[in-house]
Amino acid sequence: MASFVRATLADQAYRELRSRILNGQLAGGRRLLPEELAIELSISPTPIKEALLRLEADGLVVSPLRKGAVVRRFTSAEVDEIYEARIMIEMNAVRKLFDRGQMTPEFVASLEHTLERHAHFARLDTPDDLATALVFDREFHQKIILAAGNSLVAEWHMRLLEQTHTTFIYNAWDHIRSVGEHRRVIDAIGEGSLEKTCETLEYHLQCSRKDALASVATALESDGDGS
């Protein structure tokens, strides 16, 4: 029974720390000391260590030379690799959905609903609201991947989404523009055009890549200034 209790605490610690990373409470480069986090979360260090291992597997935490964990700070090269993977995955999913006739009015309505929630929070300007906008941004892309029917790819894709979005949460970027780009993707799907859907989606991902690279550059400049 004790092992089940530890697993439950590790799950809770994982969810809490993951949430803090994704909403910006734990920024890139932040050291994560199990003893300190254990006191803060009122649990023992063991489930914290288990949670950190899971976050490392997610690509959100790194343990350089095994001398303790830190929140991952992405390089420009890593951002480029992640977006290259995202573009391949999302373009393939769109083609599969068109080939199978799955770009139905019901599916479009589901994307519309997500876009409405995304747009609502994107218009607000508190950190919590913008973090929530990113949740619906991820949901929009993930719905397309899930509909393509490969659960392994969908799980990998979600990790990539979360990794790229950690670069946005620390720096201002154009949430409203992202909403507009999602709008154009939906419109292209509604027109029944595979070519236009791929074109608008890839344009959106390339713009997102530029935003992520700009955020990485800003973080590096801040480090150089000693701030």
Image: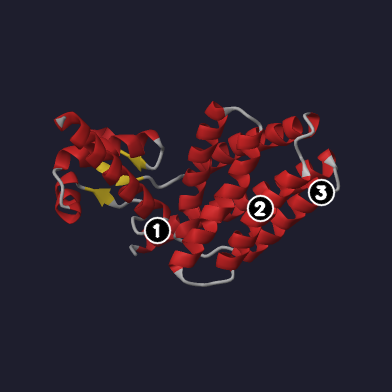
Q: Is residue 70 visible?
A: yes
Give the percent coordinates (x, y) of residue 223.
37, 58
Q: What residue is disc 2 on? A: 207
Residue 120 higher or lower than 189, as above or below:
below
Give the percent coordinates (x, y) of residue 125.
51, 72
For the residues labelled 3 and 1, the Cα–Cα distance comes to: 35 Å
Dot 3 or dot 1, earlier in sequence:
1
Q: Is residue 63 visible?
A: no
For the residues labelled 1 and 2, the Cα–Cα distance comes to: 21 Å
For the residues labelled 2 and 3, the Cα–Cα distance comes to: 22 Å
The residue lying at 72 percent from left, 36 percent from top is: 94
Question: What scheme was used to colour the molecule?
Answer: secondary structure
Left or right position of 13 against 86: left
Label 1 near label 3: C-beta < 8 Å?
no
The residue lying at 14 percent from left, 31 percent from top is: 2
The residue lying at 51 percent from left, 33 percent from top is: 156
Query: Which element carries disc 3, helix, strand or loop?
Result: helix
Inspect the image, locate mark 3, and give the three-letter code of the amino acid beneath it: Gly
Inspect the image, locate mark 2, and give the three-letter code of the amino acid beneath it: Cys
The residue lying at 29 percent from left, 40 percent from top is: 11
**Mark in the foreground, 2 or 3:** 3
Q: What residue is disc 3 on? A: 190
Query: Which element carries disc 1, helix, strand or loop?
Result: loop
**Mark in the foreground, 1 or 2:** 1
Inspect the image, locate mark 1, and give the three-letter code of the amino acid beneath it: Gly
Query: Which element carries disc 2, helix, strand or loop?
Result: helix
Dot 2 or dot 3, earlier in sequence:
3
Residue 12 higher or lower than 27, as above or below:
above
Dot 1 or dot 2, earlier in sequence:
1
